[in-house]
């Protein structure tokens, strides 16, 4: 199983936001973990890191909780790509769906619809699906 597949599997099982998943997703996309120690400010060091392409410490984005953070990751990983998401009231375990695709009217070339517990999680699953071989 690849790292991407492992993240997808964990996201599909998630029932809500998960900071450990946030950290693993951030590391997948270039964040550097600072370690498990506590900083003098009282912020857990394993929840901050060096942001990609910078030498600045920053909080690991809460991608599994925040739709804004998940959308920012989509824009960083797939610049210019579009997304759509919504509710699926018939599925109580995975009530939200999302898809990521390269351009208007090209939904068929993207991730397809994927379900998750929250819109942010569904969007992350869709994004990661575009990174699998033979997709995106």
Image: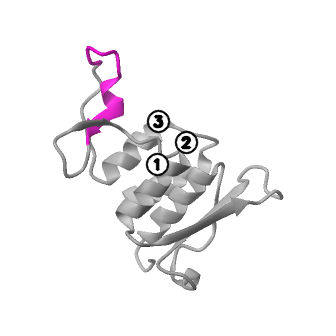
Front disc: 1 or 2 = 1
Query: In the rendered image, which residue does mark 3 sit on?
Result: 19
Q: Residue at x 26, y 29 (%)?
A: 35
For this rendering, which residue is in front, 125 or 43?
Answer: 43
Where, quadrant-wise, is the C terminus in this rendering?
Answer: bottom left
Q: Is residue 105 visible?
A: yes
Q: Which residues are magenta?
A: 38-50
Mark 1 burial class by Cα count in 10 Å: few <14, some 14-19, many 20+: some
Percent of width and height locating residue 112: 59, 74
Mark 3 → mark 2, Cα distance in angstroms: 9 Å
Query: In the rendered image, which residue does mark 2 sit on?
Result: 65
* Callouts 1 and 2 close, C-beta under 8 Å: yes
Query: In the rendered image, which residue does mark 1 sit on?
Result: 69
Mark 1 → mark 3, Cα distance in angstroms: 13 Å
Q: Is residue 110 positioned above or below 58 on the image?
A: below
Q: Residue at x 64, y 63 (%)?
A: 85
Percent of width and height locating residue 2: 38, 60
Task: Determine whether the residue tagged by mark 3 lies in a helix, strand or loop.
Answer: helix
Task: Determine whether the residue tagged by mark 2 lies in a helix, strand or loop.
Answer: loop
Mark 2 burial class by Cα count in 10 Å: few <14, some 14-19, many 20+: some
Front disc: 3 or 2 = 2
Q: N-terminal of the two: label 1 or label 3?
A: 3
Task: Determine whether the residue tagged by mark 1 lies in a helix, strand or loop.
Answer: helix
Magenta stretch containing residue 47, yes or no? yes
């Amino acid at each position: 199983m690849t790292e991407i597949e492992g993240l997808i599997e964990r996201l599909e099982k998630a029932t809500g936001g998960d900071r450990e998943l946030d950290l693993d997703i951030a590391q997948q996309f270039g964040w550097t973990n600072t370690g498990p120690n506590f900083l003098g400010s009282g912020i857990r060091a394993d929840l901050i890191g060096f942001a990609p392409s910078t030498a600045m410490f920053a909080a690991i984005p809460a991608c599994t909780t925040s739709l804004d953070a998940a959308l920012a990751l989509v824009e960083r990983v797939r610049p210019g790509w579009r997304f759509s998401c919504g509710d699926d009231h018939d599925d109580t375990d995975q009530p939200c769906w999302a898809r990521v695709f390269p351009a208007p009217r090209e939904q068929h070339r993207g991730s397809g619809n994927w379900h998750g517990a929250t819109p942010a999680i569904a969007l992350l699953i869709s994004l990661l699906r575009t990174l699998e071989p033979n997709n995106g």
